[in-house]
Amino acid sequence: MSANQLPDVPVVEVRRRSNLLGFALVATVIPLVVGLVAESALFGDAPGRVLRLAIVIAVAVLVLWLGIRRGRLLITRERFGRRGWLGRRWTPRNRLARSVLIASIANPNGPDARMLFIFDRDGKLVARLSGTAWGNDGLATVIEALALPFSAVPDRLTVKEVAALEPNAFRWYERLG
């Protein structure tokens, strides 16, 4: 079997950072608890509602844990892929054109984030990867493994400034804020 006939196996695999699980659990469980406790206080039937609350929280925790644990970036000789809750999405590497690393994007709802944008030949966004989710080392690994033409913006930018620089980097409703 020659090198050209080798199967399309991952050459590089980057895992989602596992420390997101605590944040995701808190962000999901607290509203569930508050909502169900308020419902119990207003409408009674506390034992039944507590049981439903426990079941809902257990299912939410399981879904979040599985989603975060399944998160992967896969780079093969032929394709770039992302794996998450809904399976894998692949893009042929020959369609990828360039990547842009923004050193810091201002986030009014949390800490600033380093972001890597990967665009195809048509200028469409293929992937938007956050240093918060994938780690700065993970972003560096992706940049190195893809070996695309690369540009870096060292400044701290807002979403609107990034959208002016790269119009396809964010969805229309994300550019409004």
Image (spheres, helix red, strand yellow):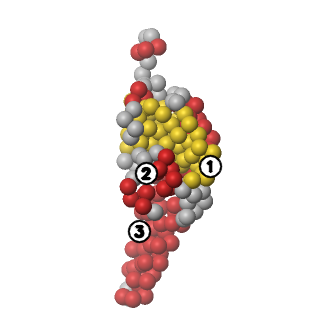
- Looking at the rendered image, the disc whose residue lies closer to the viewer, 1 or 2, is 1
Residue behind mark 2: 170
The residue that disc 1 covers is: 155
Residue 3: image location, x then y, percent: 47, 14
Q: How many numbered marks are there? A: 3
172 shown above or below 29: above
Q: Give the foreground label among 1 and 3.
A: 1
Quick one: SS at disc 1? Answer: strand
The residue that disc 3 covers is 56
Mark 1 vs mark 3, CA separation in Å? 43 Å
Q: Residue at x 43, y 88 (%)?
A: 41
Amino acid type of the residue tagged 1 in the rendering: Asp
Q: Is residue 122 visible?
A: yes
Image-quadrant location for residue 109: bottom right
Earlier residue among tags 1 and 2: 1
Residue 97 % position (x, y): 45, 31
